Image (cartoon, rainbow, N blue to C red):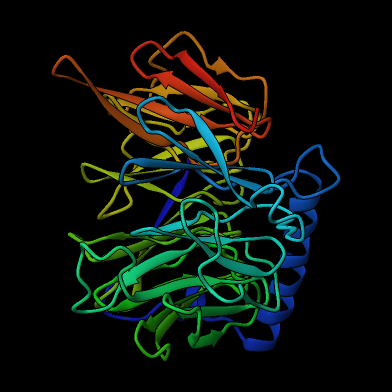
Amino acid sequence: MFHVKQLDTNEPDVGSLRLVRDRRRTTLIIISLLGILLATIGIACARVASPRGWASPVEGENVLLVSHRDKLYALDPETLIDVQIFPREPNDDDIDTVALYGDPAISGSRIFVPTHDNRLYAVDFDGVQVWSAPFEADGRLIGGVIFQADPGAAEEDDAPAGVVYFGSDDGNVYALETDAGIRRWFFETDNGVWSTPALFEGVLYVTSLDGTMYALDADEGSLLWKVETDSGIASTPLINEAERLVYFGGFDSKLHAIDIDTQRERWAVEADNWFWTTPLLADGVLYAGALDNKVYAVDAATGDAIWPDPFETDGPIRAAPLIAAGVLIVANRDGNVYGIDPETGRDAFSGPLILSDDVFADPLLRVTEDEGEVLETALIMTTGGDLIEVDPETLRITDTIPIGD
C-alpha cells in the first residue's frame, strides 16, 4: 500500500515543505550526487559506459520526430519512413551532440534541439541551422524544450516569433528569443534542472535537483513563488487546469500536488522509491510509475487511491504512462510493456509484452484513420534504436521501425 498525506488547508505544513537551509542543502547535495551516480550506472545510462539519450518521440504537423543516441530523425506520420535531419551528414561532421536526452520543440518550420554537449540548436526540417550559432549553456541539456509564441504572432507564419524555455545541468532556466537565439532572461536554481518546464497562464513551472519547484514569471524570469521538498526533483511538472494543481514526483519518493492559488501542497502520495516519470492525467485520475516497479493511480483532486493496490511490474519505471484505446500502457526500464485496466488496476492481458531493449523514453499516442475508423496505437522507442508500434487492444507489436538503418 501507499500513503496519502493530506495537508491542513488552514495552517502551512512548514515541516514538510521547508527544512533548515543548511541541513537541506547538505542532504540535497548527497542525494543529487547519488542520483547522478545511479543515473550513470543503472537508471539513466544502463548497461553502457557512455551517454546514449532517452528523448521521446514528438509529433508535429505532418511530421514525427524521433531521436536515437545522438541523432534526430524526421518520420512521415503515415508511412513512418525515417530521414536523419540533424546532425546532417557529412555537412555537420564538426557537430558532436554526444546524446539527445531532452525532447525537441517544434515551431512552424523550426525545430529546437537540446543536446548533451550544452547547446541548444535551432534547425529547419532539412537540418540546416537557422541561428548564426547555437546557444551554449554551462551545463548539459537533459530536459526538454517548450515553445511559446509571442502575443500577436500569426499562427500561419512559417517561423512565428516567440520564446523557447529550457533548463540545464548548470542549474539555470533559460528563455531565448526564437528569431536569433538571443537570451531574454535566465533564472538560477541551486542545482541542475533535468526536467522540462511547464507553462500555464503566464507562469513557468520548473523543478530542480535542489528539491524545489519554482513558479517564474514567463515574461521576465522573476520568481513568483516556490515550494521546497525534502529531496531532488527530476520529474517534469504536469498542470491540471480544472483543479488548478501542478503535479511532480521527486527523489523523496513522493508524488506531490501543489495548489496554484494557495501556493501550498494539497496532498502527497508516498511510494517505496523515487518518482522520476511525468504523471498522466485522464478523467480525473492521476497515473504515475515509480522506480519501486509500481504504477500508482490516485484521485487527481484528493490523492486518494483509485485501485486497491498499485500495479506491480518487474522493473523500475522511467517512461510516462499512456492511455490508448482505453488501455493504460506502461513500459518499464527493462522493456516490458504492460496493458492495464485503468479502472481496476488489473492486468488486461496474461502478462507483459517483452521487448528486446530497455525503455526510458515516454511513449507516444499515434492516431490514424482506416476507412473511417479511428485507430489508436502506442509508439515506444527503445534504447536499441527500434520504434515499436503496439496495438493496445491485443498488446502485440504491429510494426517495428529500425531508426537510422
Q: Is residue 170 left or right of residue 330?
A: right
Foreground pick, 352 / 134: 134
- Using the image as rendered, state which of residue 13 and residue 95 is in the foreground: 95
Q: Quadrant of the C terminus?
A: top right
Q: Residue at x 66, y 35 (%)?
A: 383
Q: Is residue 229 above or below residue 67?
A: below
> Residue 90 in the image: x percent, y percent?
72, 49
Total marks shown come to 0
Q: Position of residue 385 (x, y in %)?
A: 64, 31
Residue, far right: 49
| Location of residue 88 with respect to 297 vertically, above or below | below
Instruction: Please name the residue shown 42% across and 11% down the image.
Output: 349
Q: Residue furthest front?
A: 91
Q: Residue 238's x, y, as percent?
A: 37, 58
Could you say which quadrant of the image residue 137 lies in?
A: bottom right
In the rendered structure, the answer to whether residue 368 lies left or right of residue 95 reads: left
Measuring 77% from the left and 61% from the top, which residue is drawn there? 94
Q: Residue at x 36, y 34 (%)?
A: 365
Any part of residue 6 in sight: no
From the top left corner, tell me how far across and down residue 217 is, in percent: 35, 85
